Amino acid sequence: MEAIIRQKLLKMLACSVGAHQGYQVQLGKQYKYLQAHLDPPEWDLLMNTCRLDKPAYCWQALFAAQRLFRHASRQVGEHFGFAYPSYDEKVTPYIEKLFKRWQELCVRSD
């Protein structure tokens, strides 16, 4: 989550900020000024991707990252005149299916 997903998410958020505010915006090293350029709900979603100390939190982090990435990538796509790819319609239900399967396994093991 930390090494791949969040890094790609931060890059997409930076593109989204650039598309809306101009690419001259300085987000700082490791995106330390990103919060100033995000709406509070977007920032809250990003913070929800940080807690990874239990499997349930990892799932919550993944779903938050998906929602935020989907929102930001749609904005960037619209800015450049690209359509949002349809594969998300298959990926999201698949991830949700895996999550439900994980929940069932957790209930069985209790």
Image: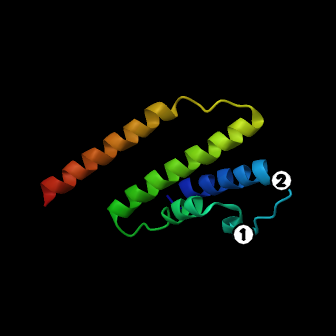
Residue displayed at 81% across by 64% down: 26
Q: Is residue 3 visible?
A: no
Q: Position of residue 78 (x, y in %)?
A: 70, 36
Q: Is residue 92 visible?
A: yes
Q: Which mark is residue 33?
A: 1
> What residue would you read off at disc 2?
23
Mark 1 Cα-neighbour bin, 10 Å: few <14, some 14–19, many ≥20: few
- Does residue 53 lie above or below 68 as drawn? below
Q: Is residue 60 left or right of residue 85?
A: left
Which comes before the other along the chain, label 1 or label 2? 2
- Does residue 75 lie above or below 43 as drawn? above
Q: Position of residue 7 (x, y in %)?
A: 61, 57
Q: Is residue 36 left or right of residue 55?
A: right
Q: Which mark is residue 13?
A: none
- Element under label 2? loop
Q: How is the image coloured?
A: rainbow
Q: Disc 2 marks which amino acid?
A: Tyr
Residue displayed at 20% across by 49% down: 104
- Element under label 1? loop
Q: Quadrant of residue 58?
A: bottom left
- Does residue 110 lie above or below 74 as drawn? below
